[in-house]
Image: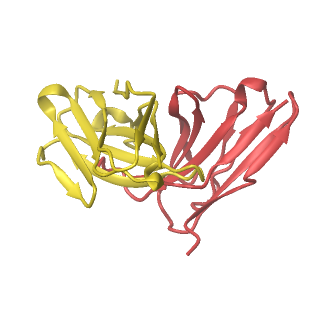
Amino acid sequence: DAGITQSPRYKITETGRQVTLMCHQTWSHSYMFWYRQDLGHGLRLIYYSAAADITDKGEVPDGYVVSRSKTENFPLTLESATRSQTSVYFCASKNRTSVRYEQYFGPGTRLTVT
Amino acid sequence: AQKVTQAQTEISVVEKEDVTLDCVYETRDTTYYLFWYKQPPSGELVFLIRRNSFDEQNEISGRYSWNFQKSTSSFNFTITASQVVDSAVYFCALSALSSGSARQLTFGSGTQLTVLP
């Protein structure tokens, strides 16, 4: 019963490099989300997905790309990393669209861009 | 658009004191849910509670209690007899029908609670 996992947990990369953060959930939840957490901003939504092959932008999508070929995976790619993308990234999922359903979060990936 | 404000950036209390974390929200929707999440030093986000917009009853769970007041658009969280293990960042969040097709969460900026022994 792994739930929702993220890899890597820690990543250091250089400016301009491409980096992919992985997210995997075992619940077959329809919805998946990517957030970034920065001091003073709480968590801000980057992208979300309603199902395989259906994705949409959130509040701060610039510089990020997502894909969802399988229900259980939702990778987040930084095409050309910048220092402003240094952050903690959380993946989350939920089963239904209803407002009443809470999201379940992965353990987070701490990304540092040098 | 939705907005959640947690004006208290940091709070420090001594063990066994009561502490209240404030949360003020904005939404034009009449149907919405409010949530509290805890983020301990280990970093994971732990769901604590949800409350729907039609239920203004306060809720108590052990040392935790929540006060929801639609008149002031607030959903405050009180920890009674705080313990060192309560030290964490606490986030208030909102999900509404107009939050987007996934009814995604809008988070406040969080309150860092430190409970000193």
Hue used for the chain lettered B: yellow
Query: Which colour scheme appears in the figure?
Result: by chain
| Residue B75 vertical placement versus B26 (above, below) | below
Residue drawn at x 20%, y 39% is B31
> Would residue A58 be seen by someone viewing this image from the given angle?
no
**How many labels were placed on the picture?**
0
- Quarter-wise, where is residue A77 in the image? top right
Position of residue A36 measured from the top left corner of the image (x, y, whole percent): 59, 36
* Placement of the N terminus of chain A among the 4 image quadrants: bottom right
Residue at the bottom extreme of this rendering:
A1
Residue B116 point in image, percent of width and height: 47, 45
Instruction: Pick the residue in front: B64 or B95.
Output: B64
Q: Residue at x 27, y 44 (%)?
A: B78
Q: Position of residue A60 (x, y in %)?
A: 57, 27
- Depth check, front residue: B74 or A80: B74
**Of A50 and B99, the residue lying toward us:** B99
Q: Position of residue A75 (x, y in %)?
A: 68, 49
One can see residue A11 in this view:
yes
Image side of residue A70 versus residue B97, left or right: right
Write down the quadrant of residue B53 in the picture.
top left
Residue beneath the point at 23% across and 25% down: B28
**Chain letter for the part of the structure drawn in red:** A
Tell me the residue at 11%/48% (across/down). Answer: B57
Q: Quadrant of the C terminus of chain A?
A: top right
